[in-house]
Amino acid sequence: MSENATIRGELCWGGVPLTQLAERVGQTPFYAYDRARLAARVAAVRAALPGGIGLHYAVKANPMPALVGFMRGLVDGLDVASAGEMAVALDAGANPLHVSFAGPGKRDVELVQAVASGVLVNIESMREVGLLASACERLGLPARVAVRINPDFEIRGAGMRMGGGAKPFGVDTEQVPAVLKAIGHAGLQFEGFHLYPGSQNLKGALIAQGLLQSHELVLRLADDAPTPVKHVNLGGGWGIPYFPGEQALDLAPVSDALAAIQQRMASELPGAQAVLELGRYLVGEAGIYVARVLDRKLSRGQVFLVTDGGMHHHLAASGNFGQVIRRNYPVVIGNRMDTVAREVASVVGPLCTPLDVLAERTELAPSEPGDLVVVFQSGAYGPSASPQAFLGHPRCAEVLV
């Protein structure tokens, strides 16, 4: 967590003191996403990478419509994982030529919507080839397609591996030539390849190695493509530090790998562009989750701060979104940033389950009912990745500041 501005002892987010921001939102809990931080992260990525690399935002990381609309103006394209996300992207004004649609279980109607909208479909099975051909015939429109590859190698360092081995995602490397042949026979408009090996990788050297391996694989498969390759989406999966001891991603080896890839593409895939698909890395550190302390309880010597928020709004911070061993996100008492005193307390929510924990036995400023708890690193996989209907408690709000 980087240094954060304060005003009169309060966290300042998006230029607004926290208590004022809470009044502006009109309720707690809420998420707040900072425009300046979003723009700064995109600018930093562009500055660190060789020119000419396409930068896409993966909408699944945070599909809040206002945020997607803001990101659309900063990046080169949007990647979606459902017809719902596709609608958000198009409503935000995205050019369909710069929207791509991936997912292992696209419904028939979603594929028809994709063709009607003119977005690129990342094909993940032979089934989709036939359905897209039928949609083309019915609509009298071309289907723009790429093939998502499930590579014959795994990328080390990813918190969640989505490629290599037996996976539901993409087309196994050995099956790609047959799918490419079927695409040609069906008359679909082939444009390129897509790979997404994993997520939350904090090792720049390992990401670089995966990029180089992915590019080699694409070169191998491009010979079977029905038409020249226009673009290669090399995925993302770049991580952000959440827990003590984690270091921010070093982009130097990633940049070097992409420069080498560009150089080879110029001669071996002339006219093709390399594209990166980033979600969490672009938005994760630009968001906070804010909940209000309802009660302060002392149970057998342990302090519990009971808030109006919890796992139903922020499943990831509760440790129930992929963590094997639960660890605390960075948490502070946002209206007591200048308080020197510390106590060990657990921050919990109002749900009737012991899983409803936002921070367990962590050092915080002493807090009372009415104080505002802030969970940092909350810009990605927040409300849309959480069971907000669980136990019937109110939903949280979101604001872009």
Image (tube, grey):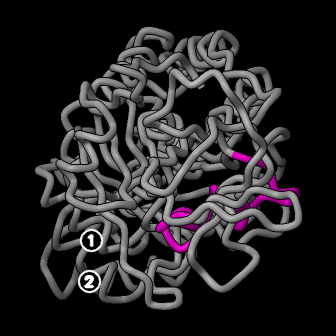
Q: Earlier in the sequence, mark 1 or mark 2?
A: 1
Q: Return the residue nearer the eye: 83 or 281.
A: 281
- Tell whether 269 sits left or right of 63: right
Question: Label 1's element?
Answer: helix
| Residues in magenta, as a range | 307-328
Residue underneath mark 1 = 114
Give the image quarter of residue 331.
top right
Q: Residues within 10 Å of mark 2 (few under 14, many from 20)?
A: many
Residue at x 69%, y 49% (from the top left corner): 198
Q: Is residue 262 above or below residue 219?
A: above
Question: Label 2's element?
Answer: helix
Q: Is residue 386 above or below residue 359?
A: below
The label shown at residue 135 is 2
In the rendered image, residue 145, in percent from the top left (x then y), is placed at 38, 60
- Type of residue at label 1? Ala
The label shown at residue 260 is none
Q: Quadrant of the C terminus?
A: top left
Characterize the magenta stretch by its predominant secondary structure: loop
Residue at x 33%, y 37% (from the top left corner): 18
- Type of residue at label 2? Ala
**Residue 159 seen in the current view:** yes
Q: Return the residue nearer the eye: 250 or 67.
A: 67
Q: Quadrant of the N terminus?
A: top right
